[in-house]
Amino acid sequence: MDINQEIHNAYEVIKEGGIILYPTDTVWGIGCDATNPEAVAKIYKLKQRAETQSMIVLMNGEKMMYNVFKDIPEVAWQIMDLSENPTTLILDKPRNVAPNLIATDNTLGIRIIKEPFCFKLLEKMKKPLVSTSANISGKPTPKSFKEISPEIIKGVDYVVNLHHEKISGKPSTIIKLTNDSQVKVIRK
C-alpha cells in the first residue's frame, strides 16, 4: 500500500468537501476540512451526534496552531512536550475554523499529530483536519478497522487503505486550558 497515493486520494476527497475514514495516532477517525461547515455538518449527521458535542481537530505544528488561536498559553507547549501519550488540548477562542466545530463555551479541542499519514495529509491540506471517533454517537469506540460499523463505512466518501489490521490504542488524553492558565483534565 502506498501512503503517498492514499494521501493524494484522501486530499482530493477532502478538498471537494467530502468526508474520510482514516487511521490516526489513536483510534480510527472520521475527518474533513475543519474550515468547511458543510463537510463538518455531514460528519455530525453520519454520527447522529448533536452539534453541541464538539469534535476535535488535528494539526501538524505551531504555524497551524497560531492560525487558529491568537493566544496560546505557555503551558500548552509544555504539556505537548511532556506528554508521552497523544494529548488533545482544549483551548479558548478559536478562529479560522467552521463555526459548527466551536463549542458553546468558545473553545476547540486540538491535537498536534506526528503519525505519518495524518501529518503528510495536513501538510498538503494546509488546514486543520476534523477527527472524531468512527462510531455512531453513544456506541463504543472501535478498537480496529474490523469493528467499524458498515453504516459508518458506507457513509463516508473515502476509506483510507492503510493500517486495516492494526489494533488501536486508547483515545487521547484531553486537557482543557483556559487563557487565564487554568488546567483541567477531562479524560485521562
Image (cartoon, rainbow, N blue to C red):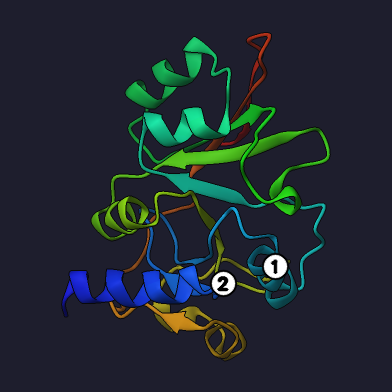
Marks 1 and 2, how far apart at CA: 7 Å
Residue at 42% across, 83% down: 146
Disc 1 and disc 2 in contact, CB within 8 angstroms: yes
x and y percentages locating residue 150 in the rendered image: 56, 90
Q: Amino acid at mark 2?
A: Gly
Image mark count: 2
At label 1, counting other C-alpha atoms closer than 10 Å, the crowd grade (few under 14, some 14-19, many 20 or more) is some
Nearer the observer, 186 or 12? 12
* 133 in relation to 12, above or below: above
Residue 105's disc number? none
Q: Amino acid at mark 1?
A: Glu
Q: Is residue 49 left or right of residue 77?
A: right
Looking at the rendered image, the quarter that the N terminus falls into is bottom left
Q: Is residue 96 left or right of residue 170?
A: right
x and y percentages locating residue 184 in the rendered image: 65, 23
x and y percentages locating residue 131 in the rendered image: 53, 57
x and y percentages locating residue 127 in the rendered image: 46, 49
- From this viewpoint, is residue 163 visible? no
Residue at 33% across, 32% down: 84
Q: Is residue 155 left or right of residue 38?
A: left
Residue 179, quarter of picture: top right
**Mark 1 secondary-structure assignment:** helix
User: Residue beneath label 1, please?
Assistant: 38
> Along the polypeptide, which appears first: circle 1 or circle 2?
2
* 79 in relation to 58, above or below: above
Residue at 70% across, 34% down: 107
Nearer the observer, 32 or 182? 32
User: Residue beneath label 2, please?
Assistant: 17
At label 2, counting other C-alpha atoms closer than 10 Å, the crowd grade (few under 14, some 14-19, many 20 or more) is some
Residue at 19% across, 69% down: 4
Looking at the rendered image, the quarter that the C terminus falls into is top right
